[in-house]
Image: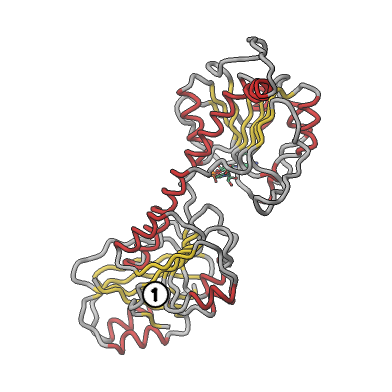
């Protein structure tokens, strides 16, 4: 399919931050916003003539939707996860998908810090007692976090930022990651999870959601932690055995826990929260709000709308979750051909042969492949015939061809 970028319409669903609308409007888009998620049929209808779609976690972009939306160029998931989008089908239809993997990193870190201090000072218990009319003024069991040994498991975006802020509070940071990671500041790398568990007094999990992490922190790991340790999980619910955690809290071996994520979470705010961790002293339970702040929402709005605008305007796929990642600076006075194709040998040679046969000069070019797909950006002079485009479009391997004119 040949798209000549005549469609400047964007559809934003699910109450995406207004900064996204502002960014798209400024870039010349006519933006329609709908505050809720749309079902498949409604979405197909709403996508007519729309080139950019913004969703959050509740709208499902399925193969059927993608097949019925030939005008759609890109989907922005204004959140972290992209499970709600059929990424493979999107690539097959030449639709780029973007998300905001870092926008709420700082929010998670701040909640973790707040919880570590709260648990060390036993605020959950003190607060509950005050509300019950009990004045329990005592220093017993209350500690400063300065000098406390913090063990970070999973030293990625969140883990490293937490490392910096924890050190600035005077904590001594240890970390363990299955990948080789640069130690930030004075953080100490542990060569095994066991080493970390035996070295620290507070353990916080920031691992990713890969399948192998299911239940990776259970009875044996809690048992290895020193007595009266604190434990936090703000990563994924399924990584921790909650029955084991409950036993260790009830025995007093774990002195406090802060849990933001659960193996099974209510579908909505009206459903009951069911967990074996309810009703325990010095345990902070929060409804998966680690990344939920106004600031993070605003950052997500700006970040993802920026990715959509750049993709539409220049073909840049940097940080796309389903396309080969490319960004090529534009050359003034050129037109840009953006060609998405099946990844088989010889595509670049064929494109360049077609251009050469029509006397079209290449001013700049970049190709990247990712699994079954290839993506090439070619900047050419502004004079060329429709025949060139038709020939490129007619190549067996072409998934999508766009021309972008300055
Ligand atoms: P990331 O991908 O940057 O870092 C994860 C790190 O964990 C990687 O360095 C990886 O090598 C490491 N890792 C994976 N499995 C491991 C294991 N078994 N042992 C040790 N290291 C392991 O991810 P990011 O952005 O730092 O996020 C971390 C977690 O936080 C993710 O699970 C994410 O879903 C969750 N998250 C939770 C939020 C909330 O609202 N509570 C908000 C944002 C993210």
Sort mark 1 into few (<14), some (14-19) or many (20+) by Cα contacts within 10 Å.
Answer: many
For the point 46% across and 57% down, which residue is it? 16
For the point 34% across and 58% down, which residue is it? 22
Tell me how many marks there are.
Answer: 1
Q: Is residue 257 above or below residue 51?
A: above
Q: Is residue 304 above or below residue 90?
A: above
Q: Is residue 111 left or right of residue 311?
A: right
Disc 1 marks which residue? Answer: 339
Q: Is residue 178 left or right of residue 279?
A: left
Q: Quadrant of residue 393?
A: bottom left
Q: Residue furthest left?
A: 333
Nearer to me, 91 or 118: 118
Q: Residue furthest front?
A: 133
Nearer to me, 161 or 184: 161
In the image, residue 228 lies at what x, y percent?
71, 19
Nearer to me, 132 or 9: 132
Q: Is residue 368 above or below residue 352?
A: above
For the point 33% across and 82% down, which residue is it? 353
For the point 18% across and 71% down, which residue is it? 333
Q: Is mark 1 within 8 Å of ligand 1?
A: no
Q: Residue furthest bottom?
A: 387
Nearer to me, 173 or 57: 57
- Report helix, strand or loop for mark 1: strand
In the image, residue 316 lies at what x, y percent?
36, 63
Q: Quadrant of residue 254?
A: top right
Residue 200 seen in the current view:
no
Q: Quadrant of residue 366?
A: bottom left
Residue 109 seen in the current view:
yes
- The image quadrant where one finds the C terminus is bottom left
- The image quadrant where one finds the N terminus is bottom left
Q: Is residue 230 left or right of residue 321?
A: right
In the image, residue 365 lies at what x, y percent?
31, 68
């Amino acid at each position: 399919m040949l798209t000549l970028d005549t469609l400047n319409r964007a559809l934003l669903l699910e109450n995406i931050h207004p900064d996204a609308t502002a960014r798209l409007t400024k870039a010349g888009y006519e933006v329609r916003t709908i505050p809720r998620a749309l079902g498949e049929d409604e979405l197909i209808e709403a996508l007519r003539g729309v080139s950019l779609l913004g969703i959050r976690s509740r709208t499902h972009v399925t193969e059927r939707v993608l097949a019925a939306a030939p005008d759609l160029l890109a989907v922005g998931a204004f959140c972290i996860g992209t499970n709600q989008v059929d990424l493979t089908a999107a690539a097959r239809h030449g639709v780029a998908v973007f998300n905001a993997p870092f926008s709420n990193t700082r929010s998670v870190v701040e909640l973790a810090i707040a919880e570590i201090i709260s648990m060390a000072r036993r605020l959950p218990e003190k607060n509950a007692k005050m509300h019950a009319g009990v004045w329990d003024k005592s220093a017993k069991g209350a500690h400063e976090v300065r000098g406390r040994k913090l063990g970070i498991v999973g030293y990625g975006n969140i883990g490293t930022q937490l490392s910096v802020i924890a050190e600035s509070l005077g904590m001594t940071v240890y970390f363990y990651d299955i990948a080789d990671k640069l130690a930030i500041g004075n953080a100490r790398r542990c060569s095994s999870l066991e080493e970390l568990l035996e070295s620290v007094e507070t353990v916080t999990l920031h691992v990713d959601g890969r399948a192998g992490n299911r239940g990776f922190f259970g009875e044996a790991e809690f048992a290895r932690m020193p007595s009266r340790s604190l434990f936090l999980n703000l990563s994924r619910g399924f990584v921790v055995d909650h029955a084991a955690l409950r036993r260790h809290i009830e025995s007093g071996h774990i002195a406090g826990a802060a849990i933001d994520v659960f193996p099974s979470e209510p579908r909505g705010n009206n459903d009951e929260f069911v967990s074996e961790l309810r009703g325990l002293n010095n345990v902070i339970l929060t409804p998966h709000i680690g990344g939920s702040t106004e600031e993070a929402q605003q950052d997500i709005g700006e970040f993802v709308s920026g990715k959509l605008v750049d993709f539409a305007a220049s073909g840049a796929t940097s940080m796309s979750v389903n396309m080969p990642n490319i960004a090529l600076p534009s050359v003034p006075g050129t037109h840009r051909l953006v060609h998405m194709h099946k990844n088989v040998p010889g595509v670049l040679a064929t494109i360049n042969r077609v251009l050469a046969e029509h006397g079209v000069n290449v001013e700049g070019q970049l190709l990247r492949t990712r699994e079954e797909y290839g993506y090439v950006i070619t900047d050419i002079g502004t004079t060329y015939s429709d025949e060139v485009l038709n020939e490129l479009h007619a190549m067996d391997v072409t998934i999508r061809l766009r021309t972008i004119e300055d």
